[in-house]
Amino acid sequence: MGIRILVAIHDLPVWSIPDDQVRRLAAALPDDEVVHVRSEADRPALATADIAFAHRLSEDELERAVRLRWVHSPSVGVGALLTPAALESPVVVTNSRGVHSEAIAEHALALALALRRGLHTAAWRQVEGRWAQGEIGARRVPVLSRTHLLVVGLGSIGSRLAQLGAGLGMRVTGVRRRVDRPAPPYVERVVAASDLGSVLSEADIIVLCAPATRGTDGLIGSSELRAMKSSAVLVNVARGEVDEEALMRALNERRLEGAGLDAFRREPLPESHPFWRSRHALLTPHIAAFSGDYWTPVVDLFLDNVSRFRRGDTLINRVDKDAGY
């Protein structure tokens, strides 16, 4: 008997799986029933699913889905899947960790280097038609061989970023929950998340790559921002870690050189948000993972896991519900 698989990823404009990828799933799984949920009106079909390929699942939907055994997220983040009911449920949750780590790490590095070299200022001055050679040229920017990179979160994204940073000559410190694990060869030092405050003052570039969990919510607040160098830049490619009001104050008061932000507490970022008007922030609309073809490798991973599920093997990227990632 075939498996009933519900594909429910349809939040425009970005989080919407292309029809051709759903057809690809159906072709690869001819003995199973692949149902594409294209609208909110179609979501009750989740009640009859054995597997859900989805990025969110409400408490009510989970309660009605009595056959559901496994949910796969098309992204790394699983916050919209880990409802209180899901934490207690036997339903397995997996994610797409590692699929787009290189793209996200490269994007984080691009934001950091752009801020360090004043390219955000050059862009503003370009719009104004102003030749800002004196203004930008007067900034003191240490070369990368004299730069300390602090990577908060040494998962697949943070590890790749640390490798890139070390390859460019930067000294790299990593922060992670499990300090008992061996440090990657390109990371000079690893400290526990509880010791974050002790290393913030040393860093020239701080990049937040840790998953959004209860433990990382508000990880960077007023006290952490005060601990940073005024010449430091902060980059965030992970959701839920920054007190945005405190960061805005730090930028306004010039207690930080700049901030590169690809993830925000509320998305899309409201038009009224002061980040839009800050001359010291470089914003991208949560697109770090997008490098031309987001969906093919995600579907590849899901298909691999369907085969594992059918055989009763361990699924790739099984989420620790208590840890949140």
Image: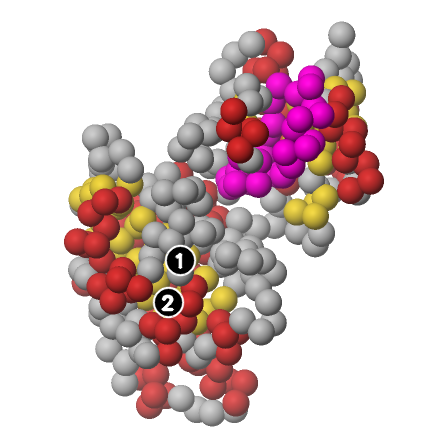
Give left or right: position of 105 versus 185.
right
Colour mapping used in the image: secondary structure
Q: Quadrant of residue 6?
A: top right
Q: Quadrant of the N terminus?
A: top right
Q: Quadrant of the C terminus?
A: top left
Tag of residue 246: 2
Mark 2 surroundings: few (<14), some (14-19) or many (≥20) residues within 10 A: some
Report the side of 84 relative to 168 (left or right): right
Dominant secondary-structure state across the stretch colored magenta: loop
Say few, some or many: other residues with alpha carbon within 10 Å of mark 1 (under 14 / 14 to 19 / 20 or more).
Answer: many
Evaluate if marks 2 and 1 touch, with contact meaning CB atoms under 8 Å apart.
yes
Report whether residue 193 is seen: yes
Q: Identify the mark at residue 162; answer none if there is no mark.
A: none
Where is residue 307, by image quadrant?
top right
Residue at image position (63%, 34%) is: 59
* Residue situated in front as seen by the camera: 219 or 170: 219
Is 18 left, or right, of 192 in this rendering?
right
Is residue 33 magenta-colored?
no
Looking at the picture, which amino acid does disc 2 mark?
Ala
Q: Dot 2 lies on which element?
A: helix
Q: Classify 157 as above or below 204.
A: above
Residue indicated by mark 1: 242
| SS under mark 1 | loop
